[in-house]
Image (spheres, coloured by chain):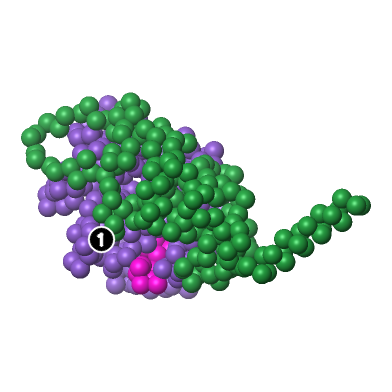
Chain colours: A purple, B green
Amino acid sequence: MKIKKLLNRRTFLKGSLAGSAAAVSLSRSPEAKAATFEGYPDSMGVLVDLSRCVGCRSCEAACNEEQQLPLPEKPFNDFSVFDELHHGQKRRTDETRYTVVNRYEVPGLDHPLFHKVQCNHCQEPACLTSCFVNAYTKTPEGAVIYDPKVCVGCRTCMVACPFYIPTFRYSSAFQPRIMKCIFCYDTRLKEGKPPACVEACPQEALTFGRRQEMIRVGRQRIRENQGRYVDHIYGEHEAGGTAWMYLSPVEFEEAGFDTSVPKEPILNYVKDFLSIVPMVLTIWPALFAGIHLLATRKDGIKKQQQTEGEAEK
Amino acid sequence: MRCTFMAALSIMALMAIGALYPNQTFALDADDAPESVEIESLAELYQPVSFDHALHVEMADCVECHHHTTGQQPVDPNCLRCHAQSTETESISCEACHSAKRFYPEDLKERNQPELYHIDKPGLKGAYHLNCLGCHQQQGGPTGCQDCHALTKRGEQLFKVSIVPAENESGHDTHQ
């Protein structure tokens, strides 16, 4: 509603002010680019198959070592972690773990399902677009990486992410930073190697390859195993498409997925609003200063006339 | 010239035999199988698996693990679309088809052919576990990680097994 109002105001301003034309055209060009951006063509992705995962936690162990994260509280072959609840919720990624596997008991299934959580590496990441110092980069390989050197610690990305992935290193007063999965970009992806978790998975529950290829593989798996999967690849369109995608044998809500995540980039919800911000910032001060001057000019003239009149008397 | 002629003749002879016995001639049977196989090409975090092949031959047909490669006719109608007439392949070992270096550039490059059907063929580690574990779950075979292979020193290091949880929570370990 608010956005609509602003839009109306924008159209009004566009029509009535010659000066705004330049600003509008400037602000529109990046917007148009974002609307047609379909992701890097050769970017990589991972297809996670919930029906294959047995919850062995090898991916968690491999991630911890590869990313040199702090030691966990429990060893990685301790499966009591699946019973843990923190504030009534299952385990989440945090500064000590970029990925976690959670167990879901699904009614009607004779075995539990395991749902691996990590950064989904969106095609158009909300964390990236929400960051006002550009600490995030979406690399052509598909990774969403983070530069702690420019980060100011505002944590807007944590609010923006539809999957609640970026976490903050509160434990360090001198080196606070965002902690999140980076697709093993520095050490593996850049060199064409699969991320550590993928290589560690014994069940090939994680399949790595070009994102486009992963969608083909997912479709084939659904088609050739009739009835064994829900006919949907979670992440193909969610949040505008993600590099990490999921196949599930049951409805995705039942395995802890948020199915209310919109099918378009989060950016689209704020793009219209954000595109008029530069215009507002450059034109409004001048415009209203002008109006103010015009409005007060009469008063000024009146005052002058009055004082002149008084002087004549 | 003479050589090529002879070669062509022998190929034709082989094809004629193949046409006479489409499904059996080149099929291996259980007697050809090894008694046991040491699966150690991937052993790093876990010790090698000593696979009792003779035991498994009693429980399953070759085709159930070796797909179409032994020359037995596959059961899955999807496989039959192409492999109804397939004969024994040059090698029937798992690693001949399932890459030990799955997801590495060479493996991905090999799959990057538009006409390729088997785009979803698992790597060696995936093939073992998907094949073994699926059946073991159904047939009541061992399913815990260390039921088949014990952790190596390197494995213990990766899984951080030396960590003792602070609280005394009684978490049951289903995989041990």
**Residue type, mark 1 in image:** Ala
Q: Does residue A191 lie above or below A52 as drawn?
A: above
Q: Position of residue A268 (x, y in %)?
A: 40, 64
Q: Where is residue A46 in the image (x, y as percent from the top left)?
A: 44, 52
Q: In which quarter of the image is residue A98?
A: top left
Q: In which quarter of the image is residue B166?
A: top left
Reply yes or no: does residue B61 show up in magenta: no
* Closer-to-camera residue (B2/A129): B2
Reply yes or no: does residue A230 show up in magenta: yes
- Mark yes or no: residue A286 visible: no
Quadrant that contains the C terminus of chain A: bottom left
Tell me the residue at 43%/41% (across/down).
Answer: B36
Disc 1 is attached to a residue of which chain?
A
Question: Position of A178 compared to B88: left or right?
Answer: left
Q: Does residue A78 lie above or below A257 as drawn?
A: above
**Residue receiving disc 1:** A255
- Residues in magenta, as a range: A226-237
Tell me the residue at 22%/40% (across/down).
Answer: B176
- Mark yes or no: residue A78 visible: yes
Q: Main secondary structure of the magenta part?
A: loop
Tell me the residue at 72%/64% (across/down).
Answer: B15
Question: Position of B6 compared to A204: left or right?
Answer: right
* Closer-to-camera residue (A75/A212): A75
Tell me the residue at 21%/62% (across/down).
Answer: A110
Q: Where is residue B123 in the image (x, y as percent from the top left)?
A: 48, 48
Number of on-image labels: 1
Q: Quadrant of residue B81?
A: bottom right
Dot 1: element: helix
Q: Where is residue A13 in the image (x, y as percent from the top left)?
A: 43, 69
Question: Position of B20 compared to A113: left or right?
Answer: right
